Image (cartoon, rainbow, N blue to C red):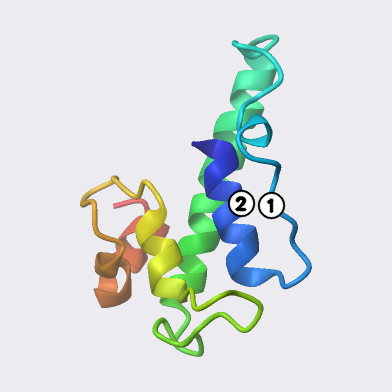
Amino acid sequence: MRIAQWDILEFSRNSKHVSPEWPAGYWPPTEAPPGKAAWGQSVRAFQADLKAMQKLVADRACDLLAPIPHGAGQTLLREALLLPITMRTTSPIWLCCGGYSDLASGS
């Protein structure tokens, strides 16, 4: 999930992003993290990427329905809906309607 989420985020905000090769690039090199520190780093990266996507979606300057210029018809809304946003609801639309401030404050 971490690699797929990172890929979706980077595609959404970076026109020079190149997605990993499918399917090998979406799997970590080992079955389990090499240690607690690596697991913690992976969790922090997942959380940071999720917050970055939430910020992108909540940005009123971003048109959620406009095609991403470097895409093939994808929109920011479509990309956000692909993410496993399940903190309080499974719908990222919630983020656009005031839920992001709750997440940012930790409530």
Where residue 40 appears, as percent x and y from the top left, is: 60, 24
Q: Is residue 63 left or right of residue 72?
A: left
- Report the amino acid beneath label 2: Asp
The answer to whether 44 is drawn above or below residue 64 in the figure is: above
Q: Nearer the viewer, mark 2 or mark 1?
A: 1
Residue beneath the point at 46% across and 87% down: 66
- Between 29 and 92, the one nearer to me in the picture: 29
Where residue 42 appears, as percent x and y from the top left, is: 61, 30
Asked if marks 2 and 1 touch (Cβ < 8 Å), the reply is yes
Q: Residues within 10 Å of mark 1 (few under 14, many from 20)?
A: some
Q: Quadrant of residue 92?
A: bottom left
The answer to whether 49 is drawn above or below residue 74 in the figure is: above
Reading the chain from its start, which is encountered first: label 2 or label 1?
Answer: 2
Where residue 93 appears, as percent x and y from the top left, is: 27, 69
Residue 105 is at least partly visible in this image: no
Disc 2, SS: helix
Q: Residues within 10 Å of mark 2 (few under 14, many from 20)?
A: some
Residue 44 is at least partly visible in this image: yes
Q: Which residue is mark 1?
A: 19
Where residue 76 appears, as percent x and y from the top left, is: 46, 74
Residue beneath the point at 55% across and 38% down: 2
Q: Is residue 96 left or right of residue 42?
A: left
Q: Is residue 92 left or right of residue 78?
A: left
Residue beneath the point at 39% across and 68% down: 78
Q: Which residue is mark 2?
A: 7
- Between 16 and 48, the one nearer to me in the picture: 16
Disc 1, SS: loop
Cα distance between the residues tagged 2 and 1: 6 Å
